[in-house]
Amino acid sequence: LVFKDEKFRNACIKAGEVIWNKGLLRKGPGICHGVAGNGYVFLVLFRLTGDEKYLYRANSFAAFMSTDEFLRDARLPDNPESLYEGTAGTVCFLADLLVPDNA
């Protein structure tokens, strides 16, 4: 979004594809190394490209956090309420999903 260079845009899109294919972590919900952080990638890609598939993917990551699989297998972060590891970051991600054009 900052650099209007096609090579950076393409690199972001490629990184997003890797995350989509490998990014459903069970480490926790947070931004740092959790599902919300990977979901944020797709919010950025949506803003960058306007492609609705990225909004779908961001919502898919959000939905995964409420599945039995995630709730059963996710690890408790060291700082469970924190912005980067815990629920505070997850809440920010979910709030940004409500207004993806401003995320």
Image: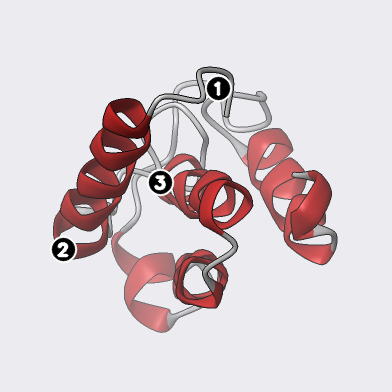
| Type of amino acid at the residue the image marks with label 2 | Asn
> In this figure, which residue is indicated by the disc labeled 2?
21
* Left or right side of 63 for 18: left
For badge 1, the amino acid type reads Asn
Q: Nearer the viewer, residue 72 or 15?
A: 15
Element at label 1: loop
Q: Nearer the viewer, mark 1 or mark 2?
A: 2
Q: Nearer the viewer, residue 20 or 51?
A: 51
Q: State left or right for residue 101 relative to residue 47.
A: right
Pick the front one: 71 or 84: 84
Q: Position of residue 35 (x, y in %)?
A: 42, 51
Q: What's the distance in space between the residues labelled 2 and 3, CA to CA?
A: 11 Å
- Where does the image place residue 34, in percent across and percent down from the top left? 40, 41
Query: Is residue 63 in sight in this rendering?
Result: no
Which amino acid is tagged 3?
Answer: Asn
> Does label 3 or label 1 sit earlier along the sequence?
3
Q: Position of 98 compared to 78: left or right?
A: right
Q: What distance separates the C-alpha of mark 1 from that of mark 2?
A: 27 Å
Q: Which residue is mark 3?
A: 38
Q: Quadrant location of residue 62?
A: bottom right
Q: Nearer the viewer, mark 3 or mark 1?
A: 3
Numbered mark located on residue 79 in the image? 1
- Residue drawn at point x = 58 percent, y = 35 percent: 86
Callout 3: 10 Å neighbours few (<14), some, many (20+)? many
The image shows residue 62, relative to residue 46, as above or below, that is below
Q: Quadrant of the C terminus?
A: top right
Name the quadrant containing residue 92: top right
Q: Residue at x 37, y 37 (%)?
A: 9
**Of 14 and 62, which appears nearest the observer?**
14
Q: Which numbered disc flags the more N-terminal residue, 1 or 2?
A: 2
* Disc with the residue nearer the chain's start (2 vs 3): 2
